[in-house]
Image (cartoon, rainbow, N blue to C red):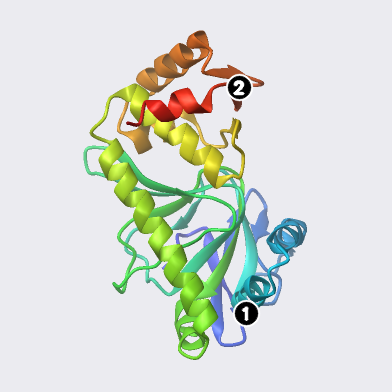
Amino acid sequence: MFPNNQWNVVTANLIMPVRYEYGCIWGLTLQYHPAIKRQAVFAGDALNLFLGSRASGNAQEERVWRNILALKRGPIRYRRNRIIVNEGDPADYVFLVVSGVVRSCKVFQNGTRSIIAFHMPGELFGWTAEATHRVSIEAASHAVILFIKRSALLATVAHNAAIANFLLASTANELKRVQDRSLMIARDAKCRLASFLTDLAARTGQSDQVDLPMTYNDIADYLGLTIETVSRTMNEFERSGSIARRSCRALVLNYPASLAKMLN
C-alpha cells in the first residue's frame, strides 16, 4: 500500500502509515513494526490549535467534532509535495486537514497533471464508494493530517444522527465546489482566477485577503491554465488595483466586489 519510504504503525485495531524522510519518521509514536526503531515527530501543537479553532460555542457542533476526533489516528505531518495516498491505494481511511493545504490530483501518461481539488484546514475528504482511491492525495504545503478509519466512522454514523448530518453537509459542500469548478473551467482566465481567489478567501474565513500556500504551478493545474497565464493574469489584477501584494504569497483583495462581478 505504501511506497518504499513508508511503514506501518500498529495501534489497537488500526494500522497507520508513517513516512521516513530526511532521517526522521513523520508520524505517531505508538507500537512500531520491529523494523522501525526511530522516534517519530509529533504534530500535537498544530492539533491543539485546530481543536481550539473548532470551539465555536455551538455545543452540538463541538460534540460532533469530539466524536469524530475520538476515531482519529495521528496527527501525521507531511512536507510540501509529499504523497499522502497514491492512486490505487486501498480506500481504508478518510482524512481531516489540521493545518496546511492538501491537493487531490491525477498525473496522466503524457506527464500532464490535473488538480481536482484543494482541501483546507477543517475539511474532511477522501470519501469514495470504490475500494481504492482514483486519484493521488499530496501535501500542497507543509501539512498536518488526521487519518480516520472509514469503517469505524461509518459504524459511528449508523447510531449518531449529528455526525451523519455533519458528513452529509461536508459531502454536499465538496460536491458544490466540484460543480462550481466544472462551470468555471469553461470561462476565460480572468474569471477562473477571480473565482479561485474569492473562493479561497471565503474558505479561509477572510473576505479581503488571501494567503497562497500553494504554488502558481498548482493553481495553473487546478484552473486548467499555464503558469505563465496565471502569472500574467495576477499581474493584470495588480495593475488594475483589484489586488495588492503584501508579500509573494499574501494578497489583499482591494475590491472583492469587482472580482465577484467577473463571475457573472
Instruction: Identify the residue at horizontal 34%, vertical 64% (top origin).
Output: 133
Q: Mark 1 or 2 closer to N-term?
A: 1
Going by the picture, which residue comes out furthest to the bottom?
A: 159
Q: Give the residue type at disc 2.
A: Cys
Is the residue 84 above or below the residue 155 in the image?
A: above
Which mark is nearer the camera, 1 or 2? 1
Instruction: Identify the residue at horizontal 52%, vertical 28% (top origin).
Output: 256
Is the residue 91 above or below the residue 19 in the image?
A: below
Instruction: Identify the residue at horizontal 47%, vertical 40% (top origin).
Output: 199
Q: Give the residue type at disc 1.
A: Asn
Q: Is residue 17 visible?
A: no
Q: Quadrant for residue 185, please give it.
A: top left
- 60 and 30: which one is in front? 60
Is the residue 162 above or below the residue 239 in the image?
A: below
Residue 11 position, x and y percent, is 62, 81
Q: CA distance from mark 1 to mark 2?
A: 39 Å
Q: Quadrant for residue 263, please give it.
A: top left
Residue 45 position, x and y percent, is 77, 57
Kindly identify which residue carries mark 2: 248
Going by the picture, which residue comes out furthest to the top?
A: 239
Residue 165 position, x and y percent, is 47, 75
Quadrant containing the C terminus is top left
Kindly identify which residue carries mark 1: 67
Crowd band around label 2 with a 10 angstrom C-alpha radius: few (<14), some (14–19), many (20+)? few
Quadrant containing the N terminus is bottom left
Relative horizontal placement of residue 183, taking residue 141 as reference (left or right) = left
Residue 187 position, x and y percent, is 26, 30
Relative horizontal placement of residue 229, taking residue 164 as reference (left or right) = left
